[in-house]
């Protein structure tokens, strides 16, 4: 016969390992490429050539999935070769996993400079395609775009956020 302390210890161990006792978000599986569709949102242009373009993932599957962390984003030339890779935006707040119910969205921003005011030299080149890899997803998406950016300027992605771009 178990004493009260042994029963409590057994219950604690069961609660810790039993998935039914974990918060719902922990039980939601990670998204795979087939769950997702991606589209480019409307670019916000500020003074000095500063640009913010949201990219929106939509869950097209019939079950919830999660995205967590930073996507990878690469500029491609006309032949599909990588010209530039985005760096991760440094934030003070921790990343939170985005749970996408069927039909719901999550997004991230590409922050870059198009060579606006203060830029010296010839115009920055324009790129027609980016390759986006969702966090923890093996196969990337190729998205048609119209990004004008120069080397040695900001080119970074934010972490994934739930909902629609703000």
Image: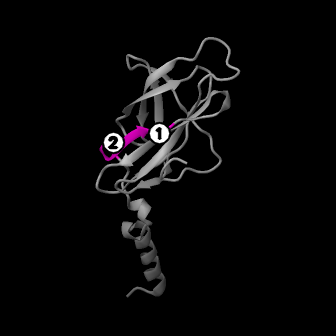
Residue 12 in the image: state x and y as whole percent.
Answer: 46, 74
Residue 36 lies in the magenta stretch: yes
Task: Decide: is 3 above or below 146.
Answer: below
Q: Which residue is mark 2?
A: 33
How many badges with numbers are in the image? 2
Residue 42 in the image: state x and y as whole percent.
Answer: 50, 38
- Alpha carbon distance from label 1 to label 2: 19 Å
Between 49 and 162, the one lying in front of the other is 49
**Residue name at image x 42 percent, y 34 percent:** 132
Q: Secondary structure at mark 2?
A: helix
**Residue name at image x 43 percent, y 67 percent:** 22
**Numbered disc in front, either 1 or 2:** 1
Residue 14 in the image: state x and y as whole percent.
Answer: 40, 72
State which region is magenta: 32-42
- Circle 2 residues within 10 Å: few <14, some 14–19, many ≥20: some
Q: Which residue is mark 1?
A: 41
């Amino acid at each position: 016969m178990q004493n009260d302390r042994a029963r409590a210890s057994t219950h604690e161990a069961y609660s810790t390992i039993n998935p039914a006792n974990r918060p719902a978000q922990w039980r939601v599986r990670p998204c795979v490429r087939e769950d997702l569709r991606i589209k480019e949102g409307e670019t916000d242009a500020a003074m000095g050539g500063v640009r913010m373009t949201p990219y929106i993932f939509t869950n097209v599957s019939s079950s919830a999935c999660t995205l967590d962390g930073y996507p990878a984003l690469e500029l491609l030339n006309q032949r599909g070769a990588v010209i530039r890779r985005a760096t991760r935006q440094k934030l003070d707040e921790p990343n939170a996993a985005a749970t996408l119910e069927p039909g719901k969205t999550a997004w991230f921003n590409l922050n870059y400079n198009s060579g606006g005011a203060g830029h010296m030299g010839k115009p920055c080149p324009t790129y027609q395609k980016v390759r986006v890899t969702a966090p923890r997803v093996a196969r990337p998406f190729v998205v048609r775009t119209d990004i004008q950016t120069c080397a040695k300027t900001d080119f970074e992605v934010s972490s994934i956020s739930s909902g629609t771009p703000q």
